[in-house]
């Protein structure tokens, strides 16, 4: 299967996930993330603001704030770039383009090199750390050349056996589903 076929398949599959499944799986995923040594030792956490059929990140963000971590979220600029914007409360975000939550004010940014851990979404991922995004390449460009620990959140229902990759695709260090933590293809 080519990437676009896989993407289309999992986008349709995601629409069929029940609210109960999303809630319980998201709670387990959040717990795995916030118990990671990489999360606990991080000073600056970059985390996506989830769309309805993605693993929820609210608990991760709140846990980071409660541990006095700097929390930054993505803001897409134009058709190719993404920046990292600090948020200090839920009031710092509102629905933007296509109803996706994004920062209200973008003046307090963080350089990519100062981010310790990045928690990123996917349409699908495999257990080896290859992720399939929505196809625009924002995260691949943002993550390229960085040393931050890259963690992808993916419902087990959306795990693929193998995601085909290209030279510009950035793999992640860890994939977390409700079933556990995958590192190097192993649970």
Image (cartoon, rainbow, N blue to C red):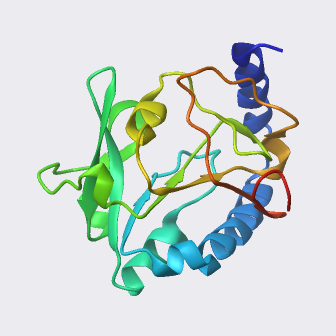
User: What residue is at 45 percent from the left and 52 percent from the top?
Assistant: 49
- 49 displayed left or right of 17: left
Residue 109: image location, x then y, percent: 19, 53
Residue at 23% x, 56% y: name it: 110
**91 or 182, which is in the foreground?**
182
Q: Position of residue 140 (x, y in %)?
A: 48, 33
From the top left corner, tell me how far across and down residue 3 is, in percent.
71, 18
**Viewer-proximal residue among 115 and 65:** 115
Residue 147 image position (x, y, % from top left): 44, 53
Tell me: residue 14, above or below residue 151: above
Asked if residue 2 is positioned above or below residue 137 in the image, the reply reads above
Count of marks placed on residues:
0
Q: Does any portion of residue 93 appear in the rendered image?
A: no
Q: Relative to 91, does residue 121 appear above or below in the rendering?
A: above
Q: Quadrant of residue 38?
A: bottom right
Whether residue 137 sits left or right of residue 89 in the image: it is right
Quarter of the rendering containing residue 180: bottom right
In the rendered structure, the answer to whether residue 17 lies left or right of residue 45 reads right
165 relative position to 84: left or right: right
């Amino acid at each position: 299967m080519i990437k676009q076929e896989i993407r289309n398949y999992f986008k349709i599959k995601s629409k069929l996930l029940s609210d109960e499944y999303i809630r319980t799986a998201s709670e387990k995923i959040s717990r795995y993330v916030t118990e990671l040594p990489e999360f606990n030792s991080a000073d600056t956490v970059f985390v996506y603001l989830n769309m309805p059929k993605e693993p929820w990140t609210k608990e991760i963000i709140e846990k980071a704030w409660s541990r006095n971590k700097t929390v930054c979220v993505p803001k897409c600029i134009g058709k190719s770039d993404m920046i990292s914007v600090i948020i200090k409360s839920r009031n710092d975000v509102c629905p933007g383009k296509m109803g996706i939550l994004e920062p209200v004010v973008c003046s307090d940014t963080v350089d990519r090199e100062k981010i310790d851990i990045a928690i990123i979404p996917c349409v699908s991922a495999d257990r080896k750390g290859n992720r399939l995004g929505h196809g625009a390449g924002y995260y691949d460009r943002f993550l390229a050349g960085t040393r931050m620990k890259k963690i992808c959140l993916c419902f087990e229902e959306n795990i693929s056996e193998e995601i085909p990759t290209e030279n510009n695709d950035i793999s992640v260090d860890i994939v977390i589903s409700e079933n556990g933590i995958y590192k190097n293809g192993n649970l």
